[in-house]
Image (cartoon, helix red, strand yellow):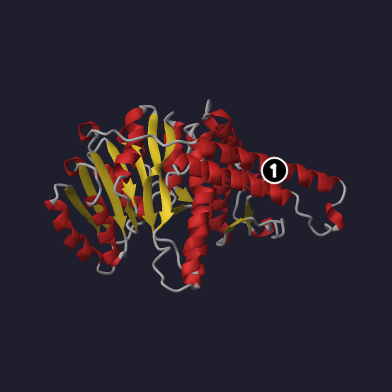
Amino acid sequence: MTDSQLRLLFGILNIFGLLLLSFIPWPSPPPIFIGLPAIILQLIAVFYKIEYVHMVWRWIRYEPVQPPSKDDKLPFISIVIPVYNESEFVKNSIKSIELSDYPKDRIELIVIDDGSTDDTWEHVNKAAGSVSICGITLRLLQHAVNMGKRKAIQSGFATALGSIIISLDSDSVVEKGALRNIVSPLMRDPSIGAVAGHLAVLNISSHSTFSFRSLLPRLLDIVFDHIGNLPRSALSAEGFVTILPGAFSAFRADAVQSHIDRLCASTFLGSPLKHGEDMELAYRILCDGWRTVYQSNAVVHTMAPETLEKALLMFSRWEQDIETMACNAAETRSVFGIRGQGKTGRRTIYHKRRHRKHISIYQRGMHLAERATDAVGHLHVAEMCDSIPQTCALDIIGDLDPDSLEELHAYSRCPSRKRYEICF
């Protein structure tokens, strides 16, 4: 079977399963879900089912861009690998670049050790010998202390010489034709600014016996397809892929270089961000008018968490990235200003627009919070603090001037605040 036929088969089975689920008799609902609430819930369910069927249909119709057959048409690329405490596994990532079918004299490999405290730097230097022999231009950078992935990405992208810059995680390996495939959309369409690769789990066959540690990576492989690869294929037709995974993505240098210097300037509640660059770069590139697409034949295999604790940390980090992007969207020309991206793009804009009110409320109250901190000595900016009493003890803030007190009091009474509140 071809890839198109497989997508058609699995797409039909997926839609059939969704429809079958709709006709399964469920136990009697609680009294609260009878009458008008039940009708509203049914309408919401119908909307999401239609949305899901539409996404699956777009996935069925999706076709990746085919790579050029001649090597002389391939551009010079820079591959940036940020590394932190990966030990000897980093050699696998570097080795996969050596084994690729991309012309070695057109590859620049930049490895950044972000202050590793183990033997990672030794393994990087050991792998450097074979890389240089095969003709790849190699550049090794090392941070004295750990500064976060954003800083490592910034260091690598800032020194890259290629017309296309590829990010690759140090716990990931690319398939033989992945490099050739991921640059193909950028070569075919000058309006494309970045390309997202196809993520698959590497460690699904590393266990010979069945256990929870072997089950979790297999489940995450399904999750990566369901919440990552499948939606990206649907958004790709509109040129509106909103997450460019750090595990494997390609950027047109002209589209991304102007945003590199600001990559480490992003903050959340006053603290510098160390991750979430995949979503931020995608939105900044989209805001500049570039298109972002997905390439299913550019496959990268990445290590997935094998324990529940690590999996929960991964998902919580993803959720924080979404909230962070919503806050930063108010400070930059984010998706609110994007037009002409089709129905799929407009739905994404609407989703982000829901955050607009509480972002503006957060910004209006933050400068007051900073002034109140000096007087009170304790400030808690809480997320989702609806359970906290909504009264602010303004009588204890005696050092604030009357205008600030009135402004802060008005802020605390604001009826439209939903997400971020100042609580004393």
Q: Position of residue 31 (x, y in %)?
A: 87, 56
Percent position (x, y) of residue 215? 50, 67
118 w.r.t. 80: above or below? below
In percent of width and height, residue 331 lies at 50, 39
Q: Quadrant of the C terminus?
A: bottom right
Closer to us: 136 or 226:
226
Can you identify the residue that label 1 sits on? 416
Tell me which residue sits at (31%, 32%) in the image: 254
The image shows residue 370 at horizontal and vertical percentages of: 53, 52
Q: State the quadrant of the N terminus.
A: top left
Amino acid identity at mark 1: Ser
Q: Examine the rendered structure and indicate whether residue 216 appears above or below residue 21.
A: below
Q: Please report the residue visible at 39 percent of the width from the left and 59 percent of the height from the top.
A: 202
Q: Residue at x 44, y 42 (%)?
A: 2
Residue 269 at least partly seen? no
Decide: is 289 above or below 20.
above
Q: Is residue 210 at all visible to an observer of this figure?
A: yes
In the image, 199 versus 152, the foreground residue is 199
Report how many numbered discs are placed on residues in the image.
Answer: 1
Give the structural element (helix, strand or loop) at label 1. loop
Structural crowding at the residue carrying mark 1, measured as other residues with C-alpha within 10 Å and reported as few (<14), some (14–19) or many (≥20): few
In terms of image quadrants, where is residue 384? bottom right
Q: Residue at x 23, y 33 (%)?
A: 70
Report the front residue among 283 and 373.
283
